[in-house]
Amino acid sequence: MPAQQTPSDQPSLWERLDRPSPAPRSTLTPQRIAAAAVAIADTEGLDAVTMRRLAAVLDVAPMAAYRYVSGKDELIELMVDFVYGRLPLDTPAGGWRATMHSLAVHLRAMNLEHPWIVRAAAPTVLSPNQLAVPERAFAALAEHGLDADTTMAVFRTVTGYVHGSVATELALENLRRDHGWADGEETRAALAPRMSYLMGTGRYPAYEQYLHRATRKDDPAWHFHTGLNCVLDGIATHFGL
């Protein structure tokens, strides 16, 4: 009797989709499935995406999407790949720095447009369009003599900055939405009693100076680009690039 095939031995979603289908071409395609699911997640959140809801949006039989995906886990993989597939990976001339800067800017925009992807794009979700991002970065860094581990460290440093920055932006947006605060002014007004007490202790003089002198508190794009340039400057200086 042949050994039973375990789930890890099964062909991946991408391997199956790369195979030509013997069935007649259908109006339902992986791209159409992904686009519909992404639209649901963008407006209602990732938890709202179910196979039944997807079928209703696509106006197909409940089991129709199972021709391509085995369930919600693979559907999320398809969604993540679809969103990453929209990233512009063609970068202007300028070497590794221009490439890394462009990737970072586009990754931030992608995550802000699709907040659910922070949760969905787990390290175990490996898709063709996801892997195209490190492929582009590695190729840009390849001519500078960095070893493989250092190349990955540089890539993770830049993407880690992006993810941390985006997480802060989204957390603030969620806080404002949950409390009904329209903007930074309303947020600071609501938090003023707590902040006044903390500043009144006299333990945070440097931070108090920031509160009084800062003029870009409500400019996340400026903060992102300034921080990104600091990261890239550090990489360039450390490795002499």
Image (cartoon, rainbow, N blue to C red):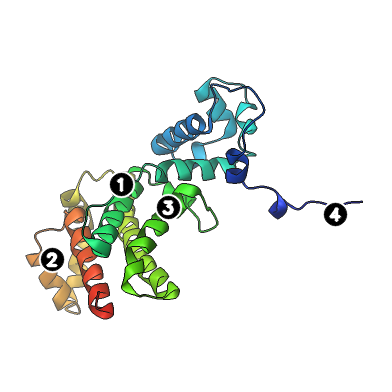
Q: Measure the C-alpha gap from mark 1 to mark 4.
A: 56 Å
Question: Is 9 left or right of 121, judged from the image as shown?
Answer: right
61 and 131: which one is in front?
131
Residue at image mark 2: 211
> Where in the figure is residue 9, as x and y percent of width and height?
71, 53
Label 2 amino acid?
Leu
Reading the chain from its start, which is encountered first: label 3 or label 1?
3
Label 4 amino acid?
Ala
Look at the numbered disc 1 and give the secondary structure of its residue. Answer: helix
Reading the chain from its start, which is encountered first: label 1 or label 4?
4
Residue at image mark 4: 3
Residue at image mark 3: 132
Q: Residue at x 24, y 78 (%)?
A: 240
Q: Are marks 3 and 2 in contact (CB under 8 Å)?
A: no
Residue at image mark 1: 179
> Where in the figure is residue 221, as x and y percent of width and height?
20, 54
Q: Residue at x 54, y 19 (%)?
A: 59
Label 1 amino acid?
His
Packing grade of label 1 (10 A; few <14, some 14-19, many >=20) is: few
158 and 100: which one is in front?
100
Reading the chain from its start, which is encountered first: label 2 or label 4?
4
- The relative height of residue 49 versus residue 80 in the rendered view (above or below) is above
- Disc marking residue 22: none
Packing grade of label 3 (10 A; few <14, some 14-19, many >=20) is: some
